Image (tube, grey):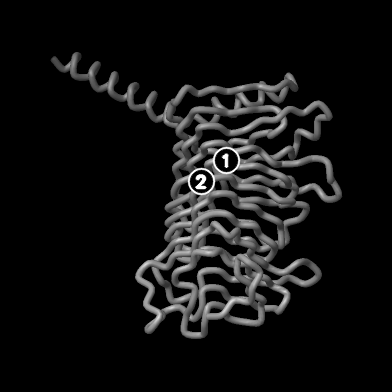
Amino acid sequence: MTYYRNVLVMICFISALHSARAADDSSILQAQLDACYAKKSTCVIDLRGEKKTLLKTLKIDPELVTIRDAVFECRMSNETCLYISEEGYGHRNDATINKLEHITMRGNKAIDGITMNYNVSRDYVTNAAFTLSSVSIQGFNHGLVIGNGVWGVDMFNVIIGGGNIGIFVPPGTKNSGERSTFVGGAIYNNSIVGLDEESSIELDFQGTSFDYNSQQMILNGPTDFTGHLENSENTKPEIVLNALPGVAAGSLYMSAGSTITVNGWNPKAPKQPCYVETKVSWSNVKLPATVYGFGGTVGGICGPGKVVTWDGQAARF
């Protein structure tokens, strides 16, 4: 009996050890990626809906690989889950279009979800942009980080929620933006802010919803927006337009068909000072035709920025 008990214990130990080792899929996936980079030809890695646990950051060359149909459980203790960059790989003149497609990512507020960055000075050809298509990024410190050398990137049906900051552009970011565009999707339920753009880059949102973020947007550059802004009334401005020296100031140009909604809005007893806070007179806000709750104890806008309505008329609040 003792013999069989010992055998059973050994089997359980080996099984647990195997499970522990199998719990980290990052090394196997990185080996697949590295094999693709070594042969310098485009690879499509289709994970067929499998769940993969990542304890280490995956390095992705945007010119060589497409990854599709997976659930990534990101369990590293710091840094970022996916790092998209050509650092260490260089630029290819025959590069192809690649993307992340049908990917769900789950993480924690100590790490970032996806970081796009190419930190090489005076390189205006190489681009760390990577198309995102039907990607869900849930529960991270920064859901999506747009760093240096990320221009003209397109993102379709990207959903970022339940984290601290949805989209983050760090201070000092260079050679980025250039009308990088989000189409559809939602930025929602982030505990600090939906979009924190700190470097005066150009962004474009088409049909995107910003829902119930603690604050909706902080902008240091021009942003074009067609979509939906909705939240309950907070005690701070929903949109802050800052200005950096020597570059275009934070501005928000909303289409006529967009909407602004502040649920529970009471114009007789507002909680917020204003909906938009501006710092300089050359910040611009163009409002949509449908607005509910664009106001505050000071008014619809704080500061010297210019506000016009969808038809170009001066706003009166």
Residue tagged 1: 156
Up-down: is 41 above or below 241?
A: above
**Label 2, residues with CA under 10 Å away: few <14, some 14-19, many ≥20:** many
Q: What x and y, as percent, mark residue 11?
A: 29, 19
x then y, percent, for residue 191: 44, 61
- Give the residue number, with chain letter if any, for mark 2: 185
Amino acid on which the number 2 mark rests in the picture: Gly
Where disc 1 sits, the SS reads strand
- Which residue occupies 61% across, 22% down? 44
Q: Is residue 143 above or below residue 105?
A: below
Label 1 vs 2, first from the N-terminus: 1
Toward the left, the furthest residue is: 1
Tell me the tag on residue 234.
none
Q: Does 58 sit above or below residue 263?
A: above
User: Which residue lies at the image location 81% right of the left edge and 26% below the top edge?
Assistant: 94
The answer to whether the residues at label 1 and label 2 have Cβ atoms under 8 Å apart is: yes
- Along the line of sight, the residue nearer the viewer: 265 or 214: 265
The structure residue drawn at horizontal position 44% and vertical position 57%, both measured from the top left corner, is 211
Q: Secondary structure at mark 2?
A: loop
The image position of residue 258, as x and y in percent, is: 53, 58
Q: Quadrant of the N terminus?
A: top left
Give the distance between the C-alpha atoms of the residues marked 1 and 2, in whole angstroms: 7 Å
Write down the quadrant of residue 39 in the picture: top right
Residue 57 lies left or right of residue 305; in this view the side is: left
Amino acid type, residue under disc 1 in the picture: Phe
Q: Position of residue 226 (x, y in %)?
A: 58, 54
